[in-house]
Amino acid sequence: MGDALAGKRVLITGAGANIGAATARALAQRGARLALVDRDADRALAIAKELGNGAAPLTADVTRPEELEAAAQAALDRFGGFDGLVNNAGYGYVTPILETPPPDFAYTLAINLTAPYLLSRRIAPHMPNGSAIVNLISIYGVVAAPDRAGYCASKAGLAMLTRVQAIEWASRGIRVNGIAPGYIETDEVAALVRDGKVALDAIQRRTPMGRLGTPAEIAEGVAFLLDGRAASYLTGHILGVDGGWAAYGYV
Ligand SMILES: NC(=O)c1ccc[n+]([C@@H]2O[C@H](COP(=O)([O-])OP(=O)(O)OC[C@H]3O[C@@H](n4cnc5c(N)ncnc54)[C@H](O)[C@@H]3O)[C@@H](O)[C@H]2O)c1
C-alpha cells in the first residue's frame, strides 16, 4: 500500500522557513502536491524549487484579506481543490500588556486566528470527503505565560476554532485538528534567546525530555494528522508535540 498522502494536494501557509518548510519537506517526501504560501516571495520560491514535483509558490501576507483571497483563488485555480490545509503562519511578541501597543495585539490576532478562520472557510468548500485541516497552535494556546497576551489569546482562540471547525465540518468528511508545539529550534526561538527574552537552560530544565524540539518533529505530527488512514477517526484534537512540557507540573 502506498503512502496515504501520495498525490494529495496540500496548501501550507508560512511554508518558506522553519516549521512550515519542514512540513513541506515531510509532505513532499510522502508524495503530496504542495501549494506553498509565504509573505516572503523568495522563500516561497526557494522551497518550491527545492521540492519540485509541481510545488507552487504563492506570495501573500495572510493578515491582508485581499492578498489571502488572491492566493487562495490562484491555488484553487491551479489545484482544483485541496485534500489538506496547514494553517502554519504565526507570530508572537514578548512584552507585558501595559507596554504593548494595541496594534501589536491586533496583528497577532490577525495572523494567528483571523487568517486561519478566513482561509479555512475559503478552502473547505473545495475539500473532498476525507480531507483534513491542521492548525498550528502552541503550548501557549493551552496554558498561559506572561508577556504573551496576544500570542496566548490568539492561540487559545485557534484551539477553540479548531474544535468548532471539527464539529461543523465532520459531516463534510473534513477532519480538523491542531498541533501544540513546545519550544522548537527555529529562528524565532533563537531570536528570543539572543534578545534575552527567554533563557535556553531554563527551557531545557522545564522540558522533561531536556531539549528543544526540531521543526522536523513537528512536521511528523502534522503529517500524521493529515494522513486519512493513520488518523481516520481523529478530529477536534490538539496534539501536543512538546517533549512532555505540558505534562509537567512540578517546580
Ligand atoms: N517556533 C516555535 O518554537 C513554535 C512553538 C509553538 C508554536 N509555533 C507555531 O508554529 C508556527 C510556525 O512557527 P515558526 O517559528 O516556524 O514560524 P516563522 O516565524 O519561522 O515563520 C515561518 C514563515 O512564515 C512566514 N510568515 C510570517 N508572517 C507571515 C504572514 N503574515 N503571511 C504569510 N507568511 C508569513 C515567514 O516569512 C516565514 O517564512 C507558528 O504558527 C507558530 O506560532 C512555533
Image (cartoon, rainbow, N blue to C red):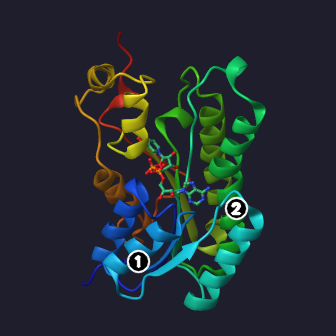
Mark 1 and mark 2 residues within 8 Å of each other at the beta carbon: no
**Given the image, on which type of amino acid does mark 2 rest?**
Glu
The disc at residue 247 is none
**What residue do we see at 65% from left, 40% from top?**
154
Q: Position of residue 136 (x, y in %)?
A: 51, 51
**What residue do we see at 41% from left, 36% from top?**
191
Q: Nearer the viewer, residue 129 or 213?
A: 213
Q: Nearer the viewer, residue 223 or 4?
A: 223
Q: Is residue 136 above or below residue 202?
A: below
Q: Which residue is mark 1?
A: 48
For residue 222, side relative to residue 86 (left or right): left
SS under mark 1: helix
**What residue do we see at 62% from left, 48% from top?**
112
Q: Which residue is mark 2?
A: 168
Q: Quadrant of the C terminus?
A: top left
SS under mark 2: helix
Q: Position of residue 164 (x, y in %)?
A: 68, 53
For residue 193, side relative to residue 129 (left or right): left
Q: Position of residue 189 (x, y in %)?
A: 40, 37
**What residue do we see at 34% from left, 84% from top?**
52
How crowded pointer 1 is (Cα within 10 Å; few <14, some 14-19, many 20+) is rated as many
How crowded pointer 2 is (Cα within 10 Å; few <14, some 14-19, many 20+) is rated as few
Q: Position of residue 206 (x, y in %)?
A: 32, 21
Distance from mark 2 CB to nearest ligand 1 atom below 8 Å = no
Residue 6 in sight in this render: yes
**Which residue is farthest top?**
251
**Given the image, on which type of amino acid does mark 1 rest?**
Ala
Residue depth check, mark 1 versus mark 2: number of the one nearer the observer: 1
Q: Nearer the viewer, residue 118 or 246?
A: 118
Q: Quadrant of the N terminus?
A: bottom left
